[in-house]
Amino acid sequence: MAKYLFKVQLTTDGLKGLLREGASARREVVTRMVEGLGGRVETMYWAFGDDDVYVTAELPGNTSAAAMGMVVSAAGGVRTSTVVLLSADEIDEAVRQQVDYRAPGA
């Protein structure tokens, strides 16, 4: 399964919902959603700064991650951005691939 980092920014409505329901209830919602897509939540942390929540999850693939991000963002309580996470083995495999490329002006 592929791994993803979801960076979440709460909107005003999302923050109101968090204050009303609490963080544990929101984690349960996220866990059900990810499991419903055939994945699993690895971590979920609230944070200070530009992003309010960080979720790492395993999902079957990019289409599942895209579907989750779109549906969650469209609901209006949060804005999300998704980072595909690669293991050392995946990077090693990428390094072994032959890429035909010439830099501009070279």
Image: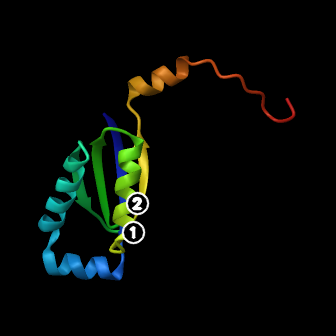
Is the N terminus in the top left, top right, bottom left or bottom right quadrant? top left
Check disc 2 and give the amino acid type.
Met
Q: Residue 105, image x and y in percent?
A: 87, 34
Q: Residue 40, image x and y in percent?
A: 21, 44
Is the C terminus in the top left, top right, bottom left or bottom right quadrant? top right
Rounded to the nearest whole Å, what is the CA distance between mark 2 and mark 1?
Answer: 6 Å
Q: Secondary structure at mark 1?
A: helix
Q: Residue at x 16, y 81 (%)?
A: 20
Above or below for 64 versus 80: above
49 left or right of 26 in image = right
Above or below for 78 versus 58: below
Q: Residue at x 41, y 42 (%)?
A: 62
The colour mode here is: rainbow
In terms of image quadrants, where is residue 49? bottom left
Q: Residue at x 25, y 82 (%)?
A: 16
Check disc 1 and give the amino acid type.
Ala
46 left or right of 81 in image = left
Q: Secondary structure at mark 2?
A: helix
In terms of image quadrants, where is residue 7? bottom left
Q: Which residue is mark 2?
A: 70
Above or below for 71 versus 76: above
Question: For residue 60, which numbered disc appears in the image?
Answer: none
84 left or right of 36 in image = right
Are there few (<14), some (14-19), or many (20+) residues within 10 Å of tag 2? Answer: some
Tell me, yes or no, whether the two marked residues, 2 and 1, touch with CB atoms within 8 Å: yes
Q: Residue at x 41, y 51 (%)?
A: 66
The residue at the far right in this view is 105
Q: Which residue is mark 1?
A: 74
Are there few (<14), some (14-19), or many (20+) residues within 10 Å of tag 1? Answer: few
Q: Residue 92, image x and y in percent?
A: 46, 21
